[in-house]
Amino acid sequence: MKTEFDIIIIGGGPIGIACGLEAKKNGLSYLILEKGPIVNSLFHYPSNMQFFSSSEKLEIDEIPFISKEAKPKRDEALEYYRRIVTSNKLNIHLFEKVEDVKKVDETFTITSDKTTYTAQQIVVATGFYDIPNLLNVPGENLDKVVHYYDNPHYYSGQKVAVVGASNSAIDAALECYRKGAEVSLIIRGSEVGQRVKYWVRPDIINRIEEGSIKAYYNSTVKTIIKDKITLATQTGDVEIDNDFILALTGYKPNFKFLEMLGVQISNDEKKLPAYDPETMETNIKGLYLAGVICGGMETHKWFIENSRIHAKMIIKDIISNSVTSESN
């Protein structure tokens, strides 16, 4: 088995796949390492999820994405990206997790849970969907608390508290309500998030106003016990009966992994990784970032549609550096 490559791409999501396509087109030896299935993050999205973006904006390498509706569903995206990987015979290892990366001179040594590789360049395209933002309250470790939502059927007839005000939380609240759950929506701010999909926002507001979904604004979860939760509200603590909590308060990149690689991270709440916006190269020579991980805690900054260009930028810089090195 080949273990030496020009480029190792860590992460087999849409942008990691785009980097693999670009590397292949330019004759570079590459390997994509993905710790789960193809587009692992998308696979863990809710089963009924509909993208905010149109299918054209989710395309990579100008490969057409045909969907039944203007805005595709999760399963259509899974099929699209899977077909790109298989039809282009991309070199990808699935269910292989990177555990360590070391750099000696100009060469990176990448150790996974299966073997060890070397590469002259590394692209980190690991996204941010793996690590949820925790509530950090007593009782969060109970089985009834989940940070990933899949299907509303499970919650039919149950008292469900949904924590959050963005798309994932609002979608879950509406779907669970329509499958017969008694839904409470816990929102830290004073309103439903402004980034909620424009065709969904009126729906949730109407359900709240008619009393079908109970919304607690300017409120946070204070404690969780087996059959109740306590909320901290502007008027004092409120205790409500509860069977399940969907804590959909967002996710964050694996900063420990970036720090292990030596990538500098801004010392503020944004936690922005350091990289050259013209080339995507970090403060570590030969180590590049691609995709939504570039935004640090600003998880609404980068999407597939505006970060797919990273693939061409990175490969262009790698080729340019290679030509420069050879001429010297």
Image (spheres, rainbow, N blue to C red):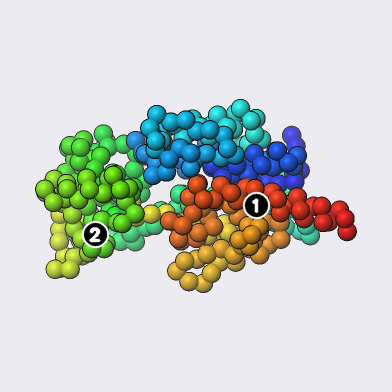
Give the image location of residue 167, x and y in percent: 33, 49
Tell me the residue at 54%/42% (across/down).
Answer: 13
Q: Nearer the viewer, residue 162 or 298?
A: 298
Q: Which of marks 2 and 1 is nearer the N terminus?
A: 2
Which image quarter holds the C terminus? bottom right
Which image quarter holds the N terminus? top right
Is 11 placed left or right of 227 in the picture?
Answer: right
> Residue 165's quadrant in the figure?
bottom left
Q: Which mark is residue 46?
A: none
Can residue 243 be seen here? The reply is no
Tell me the residue at 47%/30% (across/down).
Answer: 66
Tell me the residue at 79%/52% (across/down).
Answer: 322
Q: Which of 39 and 96 is in front in this view?
A: 39
Give the image location of residue 109, x and y in percent: 72, 51
At label 2, the amino acid type is Glu
Q: Residues within 10 Å of mark 1 (few under 14, many from 20)?
A: some
Task: Name the residue tied to disc 1.
Answer: 313
Q: Residue furthest bottom?
A: 267
Give the image location of residue 249, x and y in percent: 34, 55
> Residue 193's quadrant in the figure?
bottom left
Task: Name the residue tied to disc 2.
Answer: 191
Image: 323 above or below 177: below
- Counting the numbered discs, the total is 2
Q: Residue furthest right?
A: 328
- Mark nearest the camera among 2 and 1 is 1
> Residue 151's quadrant in the figure?
top left
